[in-house]
């Protein structure tokens, strides 16, 4: 496929989407990292993809994978865009909330085991 056919098919090189950046903070980002936007930060001067990420995150927290799905971009590309926004203070990454597991009593587990044995 020639370069002109790639453009017509809507294919864009990943370095064009990220502006050639590869900031260092993306190592701490994973697909489940929640992104919280700072509504006080000005959006002027942001690249188009960065602006789209901010528009998605301003109403509430979204995970990196949700942002990637909305933008229809690979997760690695979104991590680079998000890392730039984290570095500039536009986004704050948060670890996802995972509730602590509650321990079950031995009596409960024995009841479960006996019920399974009856099957």
Image: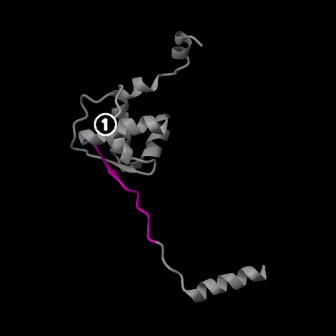
Q: Nearer the viewer, residue 44 or 83?
A: 83
Callout 1 crowding tier (Cα within 10 Å): few <14, some 14–19, many ≥20: many
Q: Which residue is identified by label 1? A: 84
**Left or right: 40 in relation to 53:** left
Question: Residue 85: percent from the left, percent from the top?
Answer: 30, 39
User: Residue lying furthest right in this view?
Assistant: 119
Label total for image:
1
Question: Residue 37: percent from the left, percent from the top?
Answer: 30, 45
Question: In this rendering, is residue 37 above or below 76?
Answer: below
Question: In this rendering, is residue 9 above or below 41?
Answer: above
Colour theme: one colour
Q: Main secondary structure of the magenta part?
A: loop
Question: In this rendering, is residue 53 above or below 9?
Answer: below
Question: Residue 4: percent from the left, percent from the top?
Answer: 52, 10
Q: Quadrant of the N terminus?
A: top right
Give the SS element for disc 1. helix
Indicate whether residue 96 is drawn in magenta. yes
Q: Quadrant of the C terminus?
A: bottom right
Residue at screen point 56% across, 10% down: 2
Question: Residue 54: percent from the left, percent from the top?
Answer: 33, 39
Residue at screen point 38% across, 51% down: 34
Residue at screen point 38% across, 31% down: 49
Q: Quadrant of residue 95?
A: bottom left
* Magenta segment: 90-100
Q: Nearer the viewer, residue 85 or 45?
A: 85
Question: In this rendering, is residue 32 above or below 102?
Answer: above
């Amino acid at each position: 496929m020639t370069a002109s056919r790639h453009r017509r098919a809507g294919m864009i090189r990943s370095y064009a989407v990220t502006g050639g950046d590869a900031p260092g903070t993306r190592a701490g980002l994973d697909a489940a990292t929640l992104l919280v936007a700072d509504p006080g930060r000005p959006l002027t001067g942001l690249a188009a993809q960065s602006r789209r990420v901010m528009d998605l995150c301003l109403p509430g927290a979204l995970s990196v994978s949700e942002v990637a799905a909305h933008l229809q971009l690979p997760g690695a590309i979104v991590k680079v865009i998000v890392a730039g926004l984290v570095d500039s203070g536009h986004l704050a990454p948060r670890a996802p909330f995972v509730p602590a597991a509650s321990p079950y009593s031995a009596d409960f587990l024995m009841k479960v085991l006996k019920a399974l044995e009856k099957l």
